[in-house]
Image: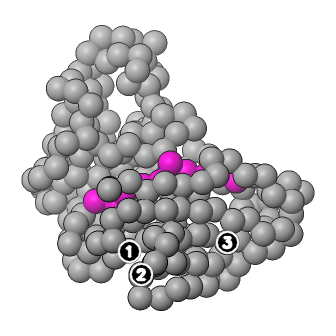
Amino acid sequence: GAGVSQSPSNKVTEKGKDVELRCDPISGHTALYWYRQSLGQGLEFLIYFQGNSAPDKSGLPSDRFSAERTGGSVSTLTIQRTQQEDSAVYLCASSLGPRLRVHEQYFGPGTRLTVT
Amino acid sequence: QQQVKQSPQSLIVQKGGISIINCAYENTAFDYFPWYQQFPGKGPALLIAIRPDVSEKKEGRFTISFNKSAKQFSLHIMDSQPGDSATYFCAAQRDSNYQLIWGAGTKLIIKP
């Protein structure tokens, strides 16, 4: 079946503009994660959704970042008033959810965001 | 206590050699220890995973060795090939928690 898809694959924006990044998880996956990966760096956890609820928003770097998920499926990560330090690859992952002993996260290809 | 420490940061191995990447953790409540592989321009993908009730798991050329008393686990890639060149991440998770705790990653280069 189809994997996790993200759009756009690349986004170049001017400092101060708002951007929206989209994630389509694997059908039936109730858990959805957003991560940020700076060039050559590790994975920085941003937010976790279980269904449409976000019980953990602790990784969002500032109040310029927000995310929502609708219909237990598509998720949108919004960054307002973008700054140059927001430039990174934003990765989305989904998993079957908090079923005991089933943890594999399936990642999308990411959105490369460049703020000029 | 939530950290997973990964080393080395980068590794160069000759084709046919053995690549070894190490991780250490503090939280003894972790139940699940996966390794993810990431190629440039792609998202990470699960490579192999282990639970603390076994000391070793092998899948093809990839082996996880797990030392519960030392709170360490490692990935061994036998007969390393240029196609194995990628960034490898270790991680740890509790069954009761949704969150994967990630290592910082190791960039592996296999020289032909």
> What residue span does the magenta drawing correspond to?
B99-108
Q: Residues within 10 Å of mark 3 (few under 14, many from 20)?
A: some
Q: Secondary structure at mark 3?
A: strand
User: In the figure, B62 relative to A79: above or below?
Assistant: below
Q: Is residue B106 above or below residue B92?
A: above
- Label 1 secondary element: loop
* Mark 2 and mark 1 residues within 8 Å of each other at the beta carbon: yes
The amino acid type found where label 2 is placed reads Arg
**Distance (Cα) linking label 3 and label 2:** 16 Å
User: Of label 2 and label 1, which has the lower sequence position?
Assistant: 1
- The residue closer to the viewer here, A92 or B4, is B4
* Amino acid, disc 1: Tyr
| Residue under pointer 1 | B32
User: Mark 3 — on which chain does it sit?
Assistant: B
Residue tagged 2: B51
Residue A59 on image: x %, y %: 25, 41
Up-down relation of residue B76 to residue B112 (above or below): below
Question: Which amino acid is tagged 3?
Answer: His
Mark linked to residue B76: 3
* Letter of the chain that mark 1 sits on in the rendering: B
Q: Quadrant of residue B60?
A: bottom right
Q: Position of residue A87 (x, y in %)?
A: 44, 25
Q: CA distance from mark 3 to mark 1?
A: 18 Å
Res B51 quadrant in image: bottom left
Mark found first going from the N terminus, 3 or 1: 1
The answer to whether marks 2 and 1 sit on the same chain is yes
Q: Earlier in the sequence, mark 3 or mark 2?
A: 2
Element on which disc 2 rests: loop
Left-right relation of A76 to B11: left
User: Dot 2 falls on which chain?
Assistant: B
